[in-house]
Image (cartoon, rainbow, N blue to C red):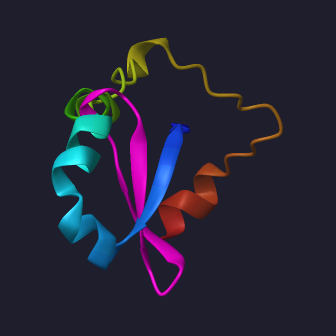
């Protein structure tokens, strides 16, 4: 899980006044947090970090998956009765 290095938290009204500085910090890899009434509501990561988080994880290779069937009981009569 991603754990940003938060350089500073900004209230939304502060962020309006300091947007260029906040964007510069995000570009430099230092995420900032926006707060509303003192509670964090958003994190601003860099575009590179955002893209890294968006990338899909490697797909599951179902052909290589092994399923543990120990203890599984299959009753053909019960299945055919349905």
Nearest the eye: 10 or 52: 10
Above-or-below relation of 56 to 66: below
Q: Residue at x 80, y 31 (%)?
A: 70
Q: In the picture, residue 30 is in which quadrant? A: top left
Q: List the single residue furthest toward the right.
A: 71
Q: Residue at x 53, y 80 (%)?
A: 38
Which range is magenta? Answer: 27-45
Residue 34 in magenta?
yes
- Can residue 32 be seen in this snapshot? yes
- Can residue 54 be seen in this snapshot? no
Nearest the eye: 55 or 39: 39
Q: How many marks?
A: 0
x%, y% of residue 26?
Answer: 30, 38
Q: Is residue 71 left or right of residue 38?
A: right
Q: Is residue 75 left or right of residue 81?
A: right
Above-or-below relation of 3 to 61: below
* Quadrant of the frame with the N terminus: top right
x%, y% of residue 35?
Answer: 44, 73
Q: List the single residue furthest toward the top.
A: 64
Main SS of the magenta segment? strand
Q: In the picture, residue 36 is in which quadrant? A: bottom left
x%, y% of residue 65?
Answer: 52, 19
Q: List the single residue furthest toward the bottom.
A: 37
x%, y% of residue 16?
Answer: 19, 69
């Amino acid at each position: 899980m991603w754990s940003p290095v938060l350089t500073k938290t900004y209230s939304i009204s502060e962020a309006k006044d300091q947007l260029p500085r906040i964007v510069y910090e995000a570009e430099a890899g230092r995420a900032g947090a926006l707060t509303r009434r003192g509670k964090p509501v958003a994190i601003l990561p860099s575009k590179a970090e955002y893209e890294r988080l968006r990338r899909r994880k490697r797909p599951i290779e179902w052909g290589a998956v092994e399923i543990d069937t120990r203890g599984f009981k299959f009753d053909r009569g019960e299945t055919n009765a349905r």
